[in-house]
Image: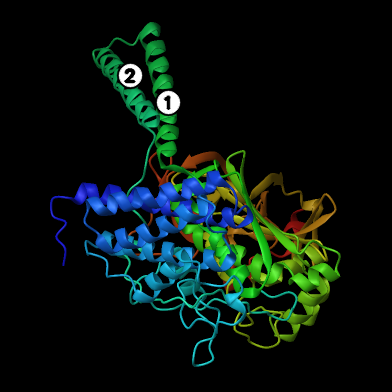
Amino acid sequence: MHDFAGMDDLLQDFITESSELISEVDNKLVELEKRPDDRHLLNDIFRGFHTIKGGAGFLNVDAMVSLCHRTENLFDKLRNGEMTLSPEYLDVILAATGEVREMFGALAQGRMPQPVEPELLETLDAVIRGEIPGKASATVPPPVAPAAATLAPSSDGSEPDWQHLYDSLLGNETAGATPQPQAALVIAEPEIMLNEPSPRLPARSANLSAAAGTQETTIRIDTHRLDQVLNLSGEIGLTKNRLTTLRSDVVSGKIDGTTLKALDEAISQLDLLVGDLQNAVMKTRMQPIGRQFQKYPRLARDLARQLGKEVELVISGEETELDKTMLEDLNDPLVHLVRNAVDHGVETIEERLAAGKPAKAIVQLSATQVGDHILIEITDDGHGMRPDVIRKKALDKGLIDAETANSLDDKQSLQLIFLPGFSTKDQISSVSGRGVGMDVVKTNIQKLNGRIDIQSVVGEGTRFSISLPLTLAILPVLVVRVCDQAFAVPLAMVREIIPIDNRAVQEVSGRATIVVRDEILPVKSLAGLLGWPETQVPRFGVLMQSAEHSFILAVDSFIGRDDVVIKPLQNIRPLGVAGATLSGDGSVVLVLDMEDLLATPAADTAAPSASRWLATA
């Protein structure tokens, strides 16, 4: 056991900086496969391994030094033109970077990494000598457990561990972790072609830090942003002193117009400064989304290699910033969607050529800020989704009834893929068919107060659009009142506010509906959703847009819009309640989880009878 006592700060700095560096190296390796003669990329990757080797040498991490030294030698030959990069050589190099990631995990736990498996070192030495043929993959049997995990099913015939695949590719495995199989959505059923990478590479059980399975507790902040916080804190301190002086004047009886005007100005100034301070503090939590995106090019590349496809992941908007906590929670949904795009969204090479498309498929991952929201899109140029097939499969599996199936339009039919257990695959294969995954994507997005939408054109491709608030720390809400109690609903779900005119209410199947711009919308009473008796006929409606449908939320009155900080309720989690906040008068306001409320049995009976309005018309 190596003793890192007295070197904690140096060790943490090395792990943080080198982990980011190895992620950059991974991305540049994927890019290098497209441009194997790019000397700039070759030099950058060489310097990356050299930098990591230097830090590892300072900390006496001999196993990492040995591995990086061999990889460095390989790239020295590549950049000097003595060797030419091939996909098989790149497989070996990526296996080495995966091993380096495992070593970082051991270091994060304060342990000296285990020596590298001799087979990997021998393979690297063989590559350096140029002994591995470029077509080795055609003859080498599928690897049993390569560093970039295979897609083979488990011995008991169950779904392969997709999370293990992803973690292995990115070096995020946690020792003793329980596998959580997750199958992807299948719309078309192309024949799966396995083209296992070679050469046969060793793999060992991963021993990464516990932090690999938990959220990081550190964050890098630009000093300019910290300076803003410091300056605003000083300004608030000056304003506080001014208010203290004015308070003494008022207490002493000095309440003339000049004093009251000065008090009003000081309060207004404090209000502006506190708002600016909140924004500045929020910005300290904001991180470029590119730090998350940089994990996916290798994931896409390795999965495409496994499936015998040619796929290029094009990333844009890396500079777009998002709350760090949300970035971490966004990881699993993005893994699902990128994997689905590569695995099921795009066709095989043969199918693409037969359809007149280029052999290489393009998957685009982009992020952009739109107002106070972040829009993330995952787009592929594959075969698209057929709404009629989706409806039929959902009906055959008993997920919907015939009446519902007939009432759904194409856009609503696409949303059926988010139902638990949905899959268009008739038989379970080593890559899909269990109908697990897309419902998890939707659930995780909703936990972030976000929304996910789908657009798809048969033969042209599919686009998943994720809309997220910039931060979860401060939530814009609309405060409404029902039964003399104030409630807050997320403003992101609010489309508009309308008065409920008795003459506009129509009864459909015994339920109240209102036509808004040629759209028939059901009316759901907030009191009914909460299980409370209605004390009066609601006179106002909030036109709400959830992930699945639009509806009108009937309320008694409005208090207004506000930006609130949600506090979780200690030791309890009432159904439909996301948390609580304080209003301006100091009273407690419950913040509602509308998706949770709409999923309750009461949601089906929460629509008040139209006769109540018709009787008062």
Q: Is residue 564 above or below residue 307?
A: above
Q: Position of residue 386 (x, y in %)?
A: 80, 71
Query: Which residue carries the number 2 mark?
Result: 239
**Which image quadrant: the N terminus?**
bottom left
Is any atom of residue 206 visible in this view?
A: yes
Q: Quadrant of residue 306?
A: bottom right
Query: Which residue carries the number 1 mark?
Result: 271
Query: Which residue is at a point 43% across and 21% down the rendered structure image?
Result: 268
Q: Secondary structure at mark 2?
A: helix
Counting the numbered discs, the total is: 2
State the colouring used for the structure image: rainbow
Callout 1, which amino acid? Asp
Q: Residues within 10 Å of mark 2 (few under 14, many from 20)?
A: some
Looking at this rendering, what residue extends furthest in the bottom direction?
Answer: 156
Q: Position of residue 393 (x, y in %)?
A: 75, 81
Q: CA distance from mark 1 to mark 2?
A: 10 Å
Callout 2, which amino acid? Thr
